[in-house]
Image (spheres, rainbow, N blue to C red):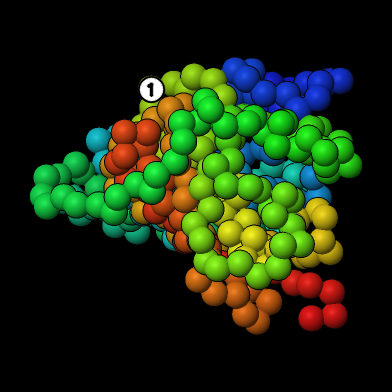
Amino acid sequence: MTAEPDLKLAADGADHPGGQPIVDALVSLLDLEAIETDIFRGLSPQVAMQRVFGGQVAGQALVAAGRTVAPERLVHSLHSYFIRPGDPSIPIIYTVDRVRDGRSFSVRRVVAIQHGEPIFTLSASFQLPQGGIDHQAQMPPAPAPESLPTLAERYEGFDELWSVMRQIPQPFDVRYVDDPPWVQRGQGPRENQPHRIWLKADGTLPDNPLLHVCVITFASDMNLLDSVLIHHGLAARLDPISMASLDHAMWFHRQFRADDWLLYVSSSSSASGGRGLATGQFYSRDGRLVASVTQEGMIRLPNA
């Protein structure tokens, strides 16, 4: 396990730190400590957060599950529930239940625990590589990521929002194809148009297939509910919205690298009862559909 000081993602005095040091810190964050058979310990980054980021606990839980499975068996799906807010000031304990090991598939169930109570549960299925029928949805058109504004450039003109966001370490290079929520804010209801983002780890990752899946699991929770907000002309941090992930499911179709560009296409088919549903697909730059994701989140407005 990497020493705790190395998990500090924010560089002192740096604005919106990124690059290889922050990617290395993300890798350390996902490198859990084995404290007993099928029991692991994970830490949170030393940044000012009221609760643990959902993508972090999902990624760490998947690491814990993968550590109990033969390396030749690759994860193909996960289903998870966020039960309680995580406390970033203390470690998270992950317990793994080896539900089944069959000839082709292995199933694991993980419970994340803090203060003696579960804060998150995850079930994941792993499979030996197999051949078979093959088809996929076509990747939507999108300009090359290098031709698009950087995240910092997208915040130009939104100084108050950027003053907060630039303090958050960013292990991913994110390029919005479509205007982000803070730009589309106030434009009123919109048709359910897909929301497209290019992203990749902002550095080089080790050659570990499970790590690349866990990194994208981490990233998948960052922008997914934006597709719900955009539908209504809302933006987090600018509108008085209470938001939290409720559940999260992913399917991994084909192998990929998380330090190569991936097009993340998301949309929302429904919002009601203080909840919003969002779905997304990850495409590699050469057009392969590599992963799909679905999430329901709590989205509450004042007096609603």
Say whether residue 238 is left or right of residue 277: right
Say whether residue 253 is left or right of residue 134: right
Q: Residue 264, image x and y in percent?
A: 47, 45
Q: Residue 269, image x and y in percent?
A: 50, 71
**Looking at the image, which residue is at 76% across and 38% down?**
155
Q: In this view of the protein, can residue 262 be seen by the observer?
A: yes
Say whether residue 121 is left or right of residue 16: left
**Looking at the image, which residue is at 25% across and 52% down?**
136
Quarter of the figure with the C terminus:
bottom right
Say whether residue 56 is left or right of residue 280: right
**Looking at the image, which residue is at 72% across and 49% down?**
183
Question: Secondary structure under badge 1?
Answer: loop
Pointer 1 residue: 207
Is residue 126 depicted above or below 70 in this figure?
below
**Looking at the image, which residue is at 81% across and 53% down?**
237
**Residue type indicated by callout 1:** Asp
221 or 186: nearer the viewer: 186
**How many marks do you count on the picture?**
1
65 or 165: nearer the viewer: 165
Is residue 55 depicted above or below 45 in this figure?
below
**Mark 1 surroundings within 10 Å by alpha-carbon count, few (fewer than 14), some (14 through 19), many (20 or more):** few
107 or 257: nearer the viewer: 257
Q: Residue 124, image x and y in percent?
A: 39, 54
Quarter of the figure with the N terminus:
top right
Is residue 166 depicted above or below 56 in this figure?
above
Q: In this view of the protein, can residue 94 be seen by the observer?
A: no
